[in-house]
Amino acid sequence: MHIVKGLVLALPLALWGVAASAAGDAEAGKAVFEAKCAECHYEDDFAGESTEEIVTMITSVKGGGVEHKGDASGLTDADIVNIATYWSSFK
Ligand code: HEC
């Protein structure tokens, strides 16, 4: 998580538009999570993080800014917000 906080400042402003309006569809996010992420992640891996924080993390992973074993390259902006909404629903 420390790496990510350092990255936040470097992220393009456009991302803040996505993050600021983050209110996705948790059901749709769950479907993408189960198809592409559940092989390695638990659904509550990011419990306690806000939707905005998770959007920022997934965007970093997708953009290659954070080293990542999984493949997040095919995610759309909507997928990212939806997964973040799903993940942030766990406390
Ligand atoms: C092949 C296994 C694998 C798959 C599939 C995978 N991940 Fe990951 N992910 C990891 C591992 C392992 C980490 C811990 C950091 C690392 O070593 O890559 C991680 C870390 C992360 C992080 C935190 C990065 C950070 O900043 O600390 C995010 C966000 C993430 N994954 C999102 C996703 C999403 C979204 C998907 C589905 C589209 C996904 N991952 C699929 C293995 C995977």
Image: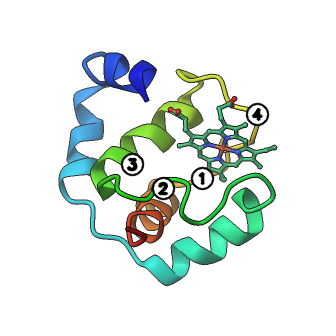
- First in sequence, mark 2 or 1: give its number: 1
* Local crowd size for mark 4, using a 10 Å CA cut-off: few (<14), some (14–19), many (≥20): few
Quadrant (top left, top right, bottom left, bottom right) of the N terminus: top left
Question: Which residue is label 4 attached to?
Answer: 69
Question: Which residue is label 2 attached to?
Answer: 80
- First in sequence, mark 2 or 4: give its number: 4
- First in sequence, mark 1 or 3: give its number: 3
Is there a contact, CB below 8 Å, between mark 3 and mark 2? yes
Q: Secondary structure at mark 1?
A: loop
Is there a contact, CB below 8 Å, between mark 4 and mark 3? no
Question: Which residue is label 1 attached to?
Answer: 75
**Left or right of residue 18: residue 82:** right
Whole-percent x and y of residue 82?
A: 45, 67
- First in sequence, mark 3 or 2: give its number: 3
Which corner quadrant of the figure contains ligand 1?
top right
Whole-percent x and y of residue 9?
A: 25, 18
Mark 4 CB near ligand 1 (8 Å cut): yes
Mark 1 CB near ligand 1 (8 Å cut): yes
Q: Residue drawn at (27%, 60%), measured in percent from left and top?
A: 22
Name the disc covering residue 39, or none. none
Question: Which residue is label 3 attached to?
Answer: 55
Mark 3 → mark 2, Cα distance in angstroms: 6 Å
Q: Secondary structure at mark 2?
A: helix
Name above or below for residue 68 compared with residue 77.
above
Mark 2 CB near ligand 1 (8 Å cut): yes
Quadrant (top left, top right, bottom left, bottom right) of the C terminus: bottom left
Is there a contact, CB below 8 Å, between mark 2 and mark 1? yes
Whole-percent x and y of residue 74?
A: 67, 49
Instruction: Name the residue type under label 3.
Output: Val
User: Which of labels 2 and 4 is toward the front?
Assistant: 4
